Amino acid sequence: MKTCQFASIVILLVLLVSQSVSAQSKSKIIGIWYNSDKTAQIEIMENADEMIGKLVWIQREEGDPAVFTDLVNADTSLRNRPLMGLTILKGLKFKNGIWSEGEIYDPESGLSYNCELQLKKKDILEIKGFLGDTWVSRTVEWNRVKK
C-alpha cells in the first residue's frame, strides 16, 4: 500500500514539474523583437492558449507611422486599417520547442503565410513562413529588442 502511495506522489511531482518547465519554455518568446531588416518591432504575447504578435513600431522616412495603413492588403476592405498595433502573428501553439500552426501576415506584400517559430538563441528567433507544404518556405531571423 505504501509503495502505491509513494509511486502516486512521485508521478504527481513529475507531472507538476513537467508542466512548469513547459510553461517556462512556452513563454521564452514573449517580448519585443526586431524584424530581420530592423524596420519594425513586433511584440509577441500570450492570448488565451496561443501566441500572437503585434506591430508596435515602424521605421519610416516620412510621415507619422501611426497613420500608415494596410494599403497592399489582398482584401481591399482591410486597406484602411492602421498598421500600428496590427496583429501580424496569430494561432501559434507550443509543442516540442517549436511554436507552430500559426499564421504570419506580411504588410509589405499584403499576403498571409503559414508559419512556425523556433528560438535559436536567447535573443534570436527563427521565423519560417511557408505556402501550403513546408517545402516552399522562407526563413528569417528576428532579434530581441534590448531594453
Image: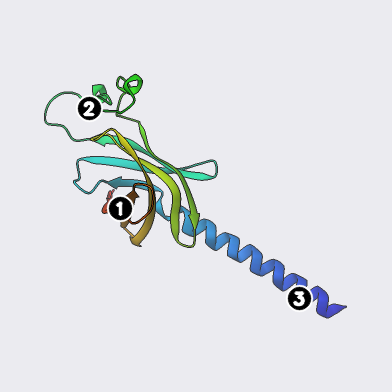
Instruction: Check contact, mark 2 vs mark 3: CB within 8 A.
Output: no
Colouring mode (rainbow / by chain / secondary structure / one colour) = rainbow
Look at mark 2 in the image and give the residue it sits on. Answer: 65
**Is residue 6 left or right of 54 when viewed as pictured?**
right
Other residues around mark 1 within 10 Å, as few (<14) / some (14–19) / many (≥20)? some
| Front position among marks 2 and 1 | 1
What's the distance in space between the residues labelled 2 and 3, CA to CA? 59 Å
Which mark is in front, 3 or 1? Answer: 1
Picture quadrant of residue 113: top left
Between the C-alphas of marks 2 and 1, the distance is 29 Å
Residue at image position (59%, 65%) is: 18
Residue beneath disc 3: 7
Look at mark 1 in the image and give the residue it sits on.
137
The amino acid beneath tag 1 is Ser
**Residue 20's x, y, as percent?**
57, 60
Residue flagged by tag 2: what amino acid is it? Answer: Pro
Q: Secondary structure at mark 2?
A: helix
- Tell me the tag on residue 41: none
Q: Taking 38 as reference, is 61 left or right?
A: left
Q: Amino acid at mark 3?
A: Ala
